[in-house]
Image: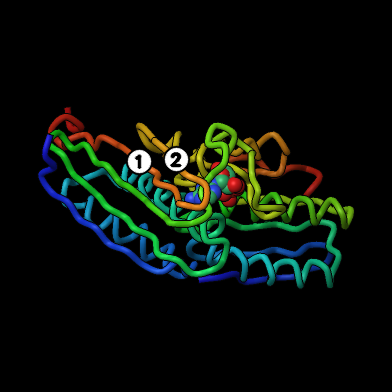
């Protein structure tokens, strides 16, 4: 199926870009009229994925983060967040709630949040090559929402 | 954006403003820890009423301050959590630590 709309952007893995990234994705998705709560869920999930690129993938060195957003018929939205960083050795383990390699100030909840706030998440990763996180959510059309 | 700190008696209150993400959390953490380690309060209160956005970095921030207060022999309390963050707080399991006070809950007698 072809998307009805699509956008891509990339930026350097500076932490000051975290809010830029989630706001940009949210602004693009706004055109299909999501609720405030749907938009908040998406912003939170994008923030988790982007932060993981900055904190883990590039580990405070600078690299590029790539984001693409596709909007499909029926309000299905697919967001890809990709890095060319260190990759994940064991994805199942990384996705377990509370698992973290990030030390005291990290909760190990990023993947759990993405899982809970989106309809679907897929992670592809290769050590030393990078990681792609695909997030999916269906925005319910207003006509249906209004009953 | 950021944090406003008020120290009164045995309490330190941190009013957190704006977004809590990985970027903002490090400054918020440094400011809270500086005053907390200086004053050694019995109670550290984090007021979340002006938090617009939060991701799991906010959970890490709370857990870190919880451990800090344990080390200092005091208590941590999170107050005025806006409804849009409640789902994240629930998912984190933080509620089980007994440090979360909802707007609609009566004041815990031990912290009057
Ligand atoms: N893009 C990535 N590149 C390399 N490793 C990653 C990436 N994303 C996640 N990881 C690994 O997966 C672990 C779990 O990630 P998750 O986001 O669930 O928790 P966290 O980032 O450690 O903590 P939190 O998100 O709560 O601050 C990380 O600690 C890290 O080891
Ligand atoms: Mg994370």
Figure coloring? rainbow
Identify the disc placed on residue A114. 2
Asked which secondary structure carries label 2, the reply is helix
Q: Residues within 10 Å of mark 1 (few under 14, many from 20)?
A: many
Q: Residues within 10 Å of mark 2 (few under 14, many from 20)?
A: many
State the residue in front, B17 or A106. Answer: A106
Q: Position of residue A6 (x, y in %)?
A: 17, 51
Query: Can see residue A40?
Result: yes
Q: Position of residue A72 (x, y in %)?
A: 16, 39
Q: Read off the residue under disc 1.
A: A135
Residues tagged 1 and 2 counted as in contact (Cβ below 8 A): yes
State the residue in front, B105 or A80. Answer: A80
Which residue sits furthest right?
B73
Label 2: chain? Answer: A
Identify the disc placed on residue A42. none
**At 48% across and 64% down in the image, what residue appears?**
B18
Asked which secondary structure carries label 1, the reply is strand
* Pointer 2 residue Cβ closer than 8 Å to ligand 1: yes
**At 49% across and 40% down in the image, what residue appears?**
A113
Residue A36 horizontal side relative to residue A33, left or right: right
Q: Position of residue B53 (x, y in %)?
A: 46, 56
Q: First in sequence: mark 1 or mark 2?
A: 2
Distance (Cα) linking label 1 and label 2: 8 Å
Compared to residue A52, the image places residue B13 above or below, namely: below
**At 36% across and 67% down in the image, what residue appears?**
A11
Compared to residue A46, the image places residue A114 above or below, namely: above
Quarter location, residue B15: bottom right
Residue B54 horizontal side relative to residue B59, left or right: left
Q: Position of residue A114 (x, y in %)?
A: 44, 40
State the residue in front, B102 or A68. Answer: A68
Label 1: chain? Answer: A
**At 18% across and 37% down in the image, what residue appears?**
A75
């Amino acid at each position: 199926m072809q998307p009805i709309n699509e956008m891509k952007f990339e930026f350097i893995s500076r932490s000051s870009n975290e809010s830029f990234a989630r706001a940009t994705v949210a602004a693009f998705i706004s055109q299909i009229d999501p609720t405030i709560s749907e938009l908040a869920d998406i912003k939170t999930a994008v923030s988790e994925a982007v932060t993981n690129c900055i904190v883990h993938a590039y580990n405070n060195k600078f690299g590029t983060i790539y984001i693409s957003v596709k909007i499909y018929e029926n309000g299905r939205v697919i967001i890809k967040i990709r890095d060319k960083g260190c990759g994940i050795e064991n994805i199942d383990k990384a996705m377990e709630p509370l698992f973290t390699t990030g030390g005291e100030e990290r909760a190990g909840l990023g993947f759990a949040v993405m899982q809970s706030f989106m309809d679907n998440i897929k992670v592809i990763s290769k050590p030393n090559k990078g990681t792609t996180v695909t997030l999916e959510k269906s925005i319910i059309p207003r006509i249906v929402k209004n009953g | 954006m950021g944090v406003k700190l008020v120290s009164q008696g045995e309490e330190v209150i941190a009013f957190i403003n704006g977004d809590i993400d990985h970027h903002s959390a490090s400054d918020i953490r440094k400011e809270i820890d500086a005053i907390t380690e200086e004053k050694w309060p019995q109670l550290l209160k984090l007021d979340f009423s002006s938090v617009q956005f939060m991701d799991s970095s906010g959970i890490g921030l709370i857990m870190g301050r919880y451990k800090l207060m344990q080390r200092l022999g005091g208590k941590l309390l999170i107050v005025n959590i806006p409804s849009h963050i409640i789902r994240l707080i629930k998912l984190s399991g933080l509620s089980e630590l007994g440090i979360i006070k909802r707007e609609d809950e009566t004041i815990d007698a031990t912290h009057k």
